[in-house]
Amino acid sequence: MSRTQRALSFCLLALLGLAYWLPRAEPVFAVLFPGRDRLIYRQDTFVDLLVAHLWIVGVSSGLAALAGVGVALAVRRAWGRAFRPLLETLLAISQALPPVAVLAVATPLIGFGPLPALIALFLYGLLPIAQGTLAGLDSVPASAREVACGLGMTPAQILRHVELPLASPVILAGIRTSVTINIGTAALASTVGVKTLGLPIIIGLSGFNTPYVVQGALMVGLLALTVDQAFAVLAQPLRRWREPDGQETLSALTL
Amino acid sequence: MIDISQVSKTFGSAGPAVDDLSLHIATGEFVVLIGASGSGKSTTLRMINRLVEPDRGSIRFAGVDIRQIKPEALRRRMGYAIQSTGLFPHWTVAQNIATVPQLLKWSKARVADRIDELLTLLHLDPDAFRGRYPHQLSGGQQQRVGVARALAADPDVLLMDEPFGALDPVTRATLQAELLRIHALSGKTVVLVTHDIDEALQLGSRIVLMNHGRIVQQGRPIDLLRHPANTFVHDFVGRTEIGIRLLALDRVASRLRPGERAAGEPISAELSLREALSAFVARRVDRLPVVDEQGRPAGALCFDDLLER
């Protein structure tokens, strides 16, 4: 088990342990915040909130990854090249809108519930992924592309066997940034009534209940760390060929 | 093998890169396209495997107009190597060499055999190099792998665009010798682009000197040196160094006096006369003992013999 994998296991254990321990932590919070009642958030279990949070982040980031990589690939084709500046402007604008504002505008139009939150998170997550994909593809050496073509690979084969594998570390880094940011931003979706780990934070803030805020924040923070570490583990094999004594047999070749 | 007929290509608004060029390349020839940058030599090479499509004219490969062959299919029948090697950095040496055989769907066993055969041909130990990644190789080793990859599917033609341009002089000389050996062994048709006149003179069975998209002169190396068609050719082959370059075309063996003796450290009969001249000057002698490939005394070379009679 590598160091990154050990760190991931540690984060994961800490996260699950916290979700299990918080409902039983009344004595600790009683010491930290003396003279209060309602010390522990109990409207939902933290496991429920964690699952709901992961679901909304998973759906929005999954769609953002598909769309982000898709548009980036499209504007690199001959027919899409003219749209690249437009795409970069649109992405910059979408990044400039505060997610709370998107929620505030989308909710009256679409109604309460997860849909406006999904839209806001999707738009917010698009930029790092599309930019990562563009940067990754730009970093593929021109000589590799030229030789791939000169040796008789079709454009689809060049993309699959040369461009995407070489760009994948940078693409994955973009997705990692996007997902990590979205985990934090998703907490805000609770302002429009979506069940996420942000719910204890929002309720705690509006009811001046600091213990709730602390509990929600701890969970969101640990979740972000865990997912970030999971991406670090995913990124490892993509860079294997850069390592000093990488060994690989022909059987791994999959053309 | 390759018939280029009245081909022109213009990029953008500048003058034509290739201008009404016709060139016939026979099977087994080693043709070197040479010229300054912008002379159209690379464009000509890249039109042969359809990386560049000509505006006018036609190119025939083995009797068939290349526009009737799918570009990918055509390219898989022509080996291709370029200056910066273009090895795929995320693939091992074996995977890189296997590129075209894999595209042609060869069986695993056949591919593995071919990889070992080519590594051996290019003097790389298969067991040591098969699993390495390009960044673990020296520049010369990378270029050997690049050449092996170009040869992998046993193509009819080898196209090389300044393959040794980025190498140090010693490595370059070794690889040039290897390429000549492989050409002699395989009898493949080779088209090589370079701007280095010494490389062209050493490698080419025919040299095609280009300027402004046209052929200025073509012929055997000795033709260009002895009978330059105009001052451009004369300048290009190096006015003041023509004598030296003529010497480089011949081996010591051709001027040897068999059976005669001389004192001192012997030189090999396989050396070029240019290297022999260097030895005369460096050692301040006018007679050198010569040994054959096996190291047996073969005779002597006299300074006067350097002059053709």
Image (cartoon, coloured by chain):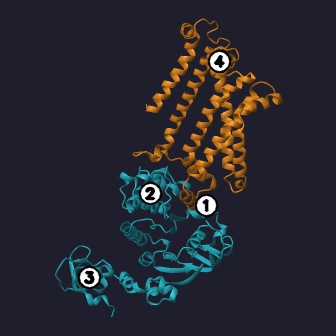
Q: Amino acid at mark 1?
A: Glu
Q: Residues under labels 4 and 3: Cα distance?
A: 90 Å
Name the residue that disc number 3 marks: B281
Q: Is residue B139 above or below residue A33?
A: below
Q: Is residue B237 above or below residue B95?
A: below
Mark 2 in CB contact with mark 3 (< 8 angstroms): no
| Residue A84 placement, left or right of B190 | right
* The label number, if any, that marks residue B114 in the structure image: 2
Q: Position of residue B210 (x, y in %)?
A: 55, 79
Mark 4 in CB contact with mark 1 (< 8 angstroms): no
Q: Residues within 10 Å of mark 1 (few under 14, many from 20)?
A: some
Q: Is residue A27 above or below residue A86?
A: above
Q: Position of residue A119 (x, y in %)?
A: 74, 33
Q: Residues within 10 Å of mark 4 (few under 14, many from 20)?
A: some
Helix, strand or loop at label 2? It is helix
Q: Nearer the viewer, mark 2 or mark 4?
A: 4
Q: Residue at x 65, y 24 (%)?
A: A53
Chain ID, mark 2:
B
Q: Residues under labels 3 and 1: Cα distance?
A: 54 Å
* The label number, if any, that marks residue A48 in the structure image: 4
* The label number, if any, that marks residue B72 in the structure image: 1
Q: Amino acid at mark 3?
A: Val
Q: Is residue B18 above or below residue B308?
A: above
Q: Position of residue A82 (x, y in %)?
A: 72, 55
* The label number, if any, that marks residue A155 in the structure image: none
Q: Residues within 10 Å of mark 2 (few under 14, many from 20)?
A: many
Q: Camera-side residue: B101 or B284?
A: B284
Mark 4 in CB contact with mark 3 (< 8 angstroms): no
